Amino acid sequence: MDNPMATYRYLLTGIFLSCLVSVATAQSEANSTWTNYGSDPGGTRYSTAHQIDRTNVSRLQLAWTYRTGAMQQETNLKRKAAFETSPILFDNKLFLSTPYNHVIALDPQSGSKFWEYDAQVNLARNYSEVTSRGVSAWRDPKTKSHQPCRLRIFLGTIDGRIIALDGDTGKPCLDFGSKGELDLTQDVALAKEWRGGYEVTSAPAIYKDLVIVGSSIADNWKVDTERGLVRAYDVRTGKLHWTWNPTPWAETTEPRTGGANAWSTLSVDSDRDLVFVPTGSAAPDYYGGIRKGDNKWANSVVALRASTGKFVWGFQVVHHDLWDYDVASQPLLFTWKDGTPAVAINTKMGHVFVLNRLTGAPLLPVEERTVPQSDIPGEQSWPTQPFSTISLVPEGLTASDAWGSTRDDVKWCQDKIKASRSEGIFTPPSLQGSIAFPGNVGGVNWGSAAYDPQHHVMVANTNRLIAWVKLISREKFEAETNKQQDNRIYGEFGEQKGSPYGLYRSFLFSPGGAPCNVPPWGTTEAIDLFSGKQLWDVPLGTMIPGQQTGSINLGGPMVTAGGLVFTSATMDLYLRAFDIESGKEVWKYQLPAGGQATPMTYSLNGKQYLVIAAGGHGKLGTKQGDYVVAFTLP
């Protein structure tokens, strides 16, 4: 819990570096920018802007608000829509995407619109996810200024396309693919019975003259979902340059296994010709009797040669996943204390693996530990799992840990836990029902982590919810699915067609409506990445007014040279600022809708702006809207 930053100690050897960084930030304040979804290609979510700092953040005020109009579109997809975009700043334009794949270019100082492009997604179709976390930009060094498509904006769509747009006009770059777009559903074994499970929801990666893209594939509905291919295309022509298949072994299973896709954001180290790919679980999520073995390279971060797609190294965070513990966070690239290039892998389990970026060798210890084994006929769970030096959240719970606001709620939770298998974070699914804590929405999700290079401090938002999973034999599945549910937080059925078992998964909430585990249910946490030590951990938002319970959250933090952490992500609609030294909340602002996005910042003409998308999250149940909100100092 809270760890007062009176104990926060900066190493003397870092003082000189801090001074150099301070000089650099002062020189760059007039034009600090944010050119990638995660600020830079390595996903640090860090800005050198420092005009807004701990002494004046309380004076922040609205600079402008823009409405995208997304909520005026007539579609049943609103119940799933999530406005998760983080804008990027390129050539003095803010570029962002909406849940329905409109791309919008705004004036970063006034919020006025330059142009808007509609990808013409069929909104009558059902999609697994209805979101777009952002776009990517590439400037052609071989083209003169003001030439068409000198600046290209790349968008991935929820119907499985990648589109190249002219950054000046918003018109498609007709030399890319077929009239400006590529159909990514080719060669992935697209499901014939449902096309809405194969999507692109994250911003593509850019390496020199290549645009690199993964995919989002619907979970747990069948075994032979689409292949989780990662592909690189020429940014000018759209010509396929290379393809990487994370699970070639899956082609020989019966039936063929799909998934292991990279749905989150890839990271790029251009200087070393590397792209870092976070992968998901092989299909189906909760039964692995068809996909025997450790299932490499699902549930991994893999380093590929960016120019060729050649495998360099891989690190698997979960062997033979049975819990939907996909790597949801963008790999974070940073420099280790001796100058070694490093990567930090945040996970849903709350484990943080710190590795040598060039070799994949651990820089902080990793231990393989024996874990509970499955009692499901046909299942062969893996005997061990990797545990890291850094664990951001509690792992596992017993009936005595149950929480509730009334005695009846506590007893209900205790009884539910007692009746379930609950043997720690890797408790395998069972017919009676199993508990995995902090669960598949737990730990660090797609909001990823931010990193302050001045003080080697990583900041992440965490979730702590009790996941409950029950396998259902095939002959009983239809009878148990008489109630349709697709709310990701409270419960859903998964058919896992082609396997002997379907599933029901949920989170343990008492009849009173609160989680069954002790608060906080969501926090913002700071870690010294050089030592692995926790610096502070504070509740993020609340789910019970007047109490510091922390909140379920989807969205990430960013950090600035002004000594601040900015994040929203919570159920209670607030955008908050924390002091990075103490974790103390120093400012908050109630947004007009849920801030299930990661904020970004930039400086233009000596003035710093803070921007966040506030449109809520249909599955999470926060207030929906279509706002882009900017703040600055008076």
Image (tube, rainbow, N blue to C red):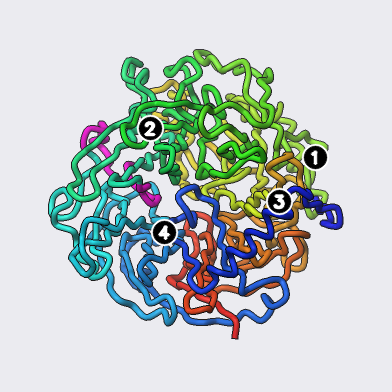
Q: Mark 3 to mark 2: distance in Å? A: 32 Å
User: For this rendering, which residue is in front, 1 or 242?
Assistant: 242
Per the picture, the main secondary structure of the magenta-coloured stretch is: loop
Q: What is the distance, in whole Å, between disc 3 and disc 1 at their CAs? A: 25 Å
Point out residue 269 in the picture as x, y percentages from the top left corner: 45, 42
Q: Earlier in the sequence, mark 4 or mark 3?
A: 4
Circle 2/circle 1 CB separation < 8 Å: no
Neighbor class of circle 3 (other Cα within 10 Å; few <14, some 14-19, many 20+) is: many
At mark 2, the secondary structure is strand
For disc 2, the marked residue is 305
Check if residue 241 falls in the magenta segment: no
In the rendered image, which residue does mark 4 sit on?
Answer: 81
Q: Which residue is mark 3?
A: 526
| N-term mark: 2 or 1 | 2
In this rendering, would 220 be left or right of 568? left
Q: Tag 1: residue type?
A: Asp
The type of residue carrying mark 4 is Ala
Residue beneath the point at 51% across and 60% down: 597
Residue at disc 4, secondary structure: strand
Which stretch appears magenta? 186-206
Q: Is residue 625 above or below residue 266?
A: below
Question: Residues under labels 2 and 4: Cα distance?
Answer: 35 Å
Image quadrant where one finds the C terminus: bottom right
Secondary element type, mark 3:
strand
Q: Is residue 63 above or below residue 301?
A: below
Q: Which residue is mark 1?
A: 401
The first of marks 3 and 1 along the sequence is 1
Secondary structure under the numbered disc 1 in the rendered image: helix
